[in-house]
Image (cartoon, rainbow, N blue to C red):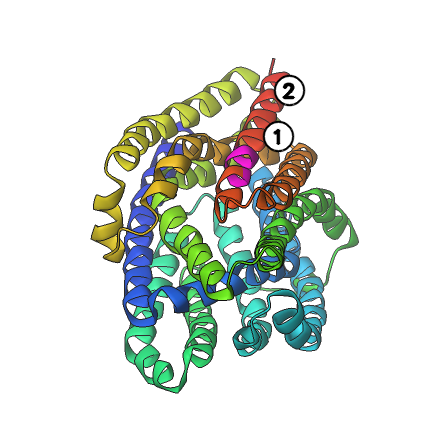
């Protein structure tokens, strides 16, 4: 198990590093093509996209991964018990997106150029859901290479499609360009699914019994997925409400729409992606950690469970501390290197120390899921969301512009991380 954990972590770290580099290149290309205003438009609809992806997945990927890791069920039957239910949820959400796209864009986001991109989300979500469920199957089996390869191939496809197609759609207008960027995900997710299928056992046989949904398996999955989905949903709703509250409040206070879109684009499109670059390391550890801790805790090996979590936090800090120091001391260097701009350096300096806590949030969160305490993740998200949304609204009236977002984000990170740390300590003592 120890060797498997180390190998899984190394594979995920290498894969995470490569996908972060590819993701960074994609963001650079998008920024150079679309400019700050185009990135701002994309970042306005991204919270809505994240919300519907969270709803569409319904927590099934985490549940699937955890139950497969326990290794006491018919895994094929488990997978095919969840797929039909997932497709029904996705179909309902696709209809909902089509119905709300126009009022959401015009009345809440105050940006009619977002309508087409929101329509495009309806086509993307079922492919994203299926792709994540396939990945979770391999997670549970602790086979990380298929996931890594599918992610890398997916990003290469996305980069190629952006380079080839984005200039054409930009000529027609920013709204078409943003819509195209969203639709690219359909092709990239299909490629990801096909790559994962290549790694299925060649002698895999499906019986009629495997394809019949099991009520017991669905119940077991829902016991895990409901608190997990609620947690993700609350976080996504917070993320969804963020640009709506920010835009509405700042417009009311007299800020221009262009100022809001531009500054929000700088924070969400430039600053946060750079600060969260080291998180590929944390995420790699966390993803490898989930099946390992699940097995250790399931066997009541509390001592080794605690050691693995401490190990994950220590490794995250080893990467996080020097990264934070560099981001605080040389913000302009990183902004110029990646985005060819100095805009956002003051935001970066303010947020960087708090992102150090963000780096250890993933191991803590995944550990709570692994020991069957997903409900505590949900509670942490609720507390953090309430604090973030309340502060975002109240601080906006101090006329400090986008700094209300910076401060509320920082305090949210502190609340969630401290809560999860205390819960892990309580359950394993």
Identify the residue at horizontal 63%, vertical 49% (top origin): 238
Q: Give SS at disc 1.
A: loop
Quarter of image, res 127: bottom right
Which segment is the magenta one? 408-413
Quarter of image, res 241: bottom right
Residue 89 screen position, x and y as percent: 70, 65
Label 2 to label 1, Cα distance in Å?
A: 9 Å
Q: How crowded is mark 1: few (under 14 residues within 10 Å), some or many (20 or more)?
A: many
Residue 320 screen position, x and y as percent: 34, 31
- The residue beneath circle 1 is 371
Q: Give SS at disc 2.
A: helix
Q: Residue furthest front?
A: 254
Depth check: give the residue in front, 251 or 387: 251
Quadrant for the N terminus in the image: top left
Residue 427 is labelled as 2
- Position of residue 14 in the picture relative to residue 381 (left or right): left
């Amino acid at each position: 198990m120890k060797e498997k954990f180390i190998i899984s972590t190394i594979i995920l770290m290498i894969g995470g590093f490569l996908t972060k580099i590819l993701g960074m290149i994609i963001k650079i290309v998008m920024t150079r093509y679309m400019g700050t205003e185009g990135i701002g438009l994309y970042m306005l609809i991204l919270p809505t996209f994240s919300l519907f992806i969270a709803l569409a997945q319904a927590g099934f990927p985490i549940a699937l991964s955890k139950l497969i890791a326990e290794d006491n069920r018919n895994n094929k039957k488990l997978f095919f018990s969840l797929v039909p239910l997932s497709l029904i949820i996705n179909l309902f959400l696709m209809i909902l997106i089509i119905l709300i796209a126009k009022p959401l864009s015009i009345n809440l986001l105050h940006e009619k150029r977002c309508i087409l991109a929101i329509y495009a989300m309806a086509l993307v979500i079922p492919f994203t859901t299926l792709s994540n469920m396939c990945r979770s199957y391999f997670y549970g089996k602790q086979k990380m290479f298929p996931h890594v390869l599918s992610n890398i191939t997916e990003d290469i496809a996305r980069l190629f499609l952006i380079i080839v197609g984005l200039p054409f759609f930009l000529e027609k207008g920013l709204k078409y360009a943003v819509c195209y960027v969203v639709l690219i995900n359909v092709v990239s997710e299909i490629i990801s699914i096909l790559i994962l299928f290549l790694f299925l056992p060649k002698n895999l046989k499906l019986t009629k019994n495997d394809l019949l949904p099991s009520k017991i398996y669905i119940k077991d999955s829902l016991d895990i997925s409901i608190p997990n989905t609620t947690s993700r949903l609350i976080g996504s709703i917070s993320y969804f409400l963020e640009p709506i509250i920010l835009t509405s409040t700042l417009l009311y206070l007299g800020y221009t729409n262009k100022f809001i879109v531009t500054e929000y684009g700088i924070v969400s499109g430039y600053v946060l992606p750079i600060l969260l670059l080291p998180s590929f390391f944390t995420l790699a550890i966390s993803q490898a950690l989930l099946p390992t801790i699940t097995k250790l805790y399931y066997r009541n090996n509390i001592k080794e469970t605690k050691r693995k979590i401490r190990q994950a936090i220590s490794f995250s800090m080893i990467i996080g501390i020097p990264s934070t120091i560099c981001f605080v001391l040389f913000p302009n260097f990183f902004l110029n290197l990646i985005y060819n701009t100095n805009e956002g350096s003051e935001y970066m300096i303010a947020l960087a120390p708090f992102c150090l806590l963000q780096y250890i949030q993933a191991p803590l969160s995944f550990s709570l899921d692994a020991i069957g305490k997903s409900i505590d993740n949900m509670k942490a998200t609720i507390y953090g969301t309430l604090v973030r949304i309340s502060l975002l609204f109240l601080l906006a009236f101090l006329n400090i512009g986008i700094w209300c977002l910076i401060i509320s984000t920082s305090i949210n990170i502190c609340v969630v991380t401290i809560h999860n740390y205390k819960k892990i300590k309580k359950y394993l003592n």
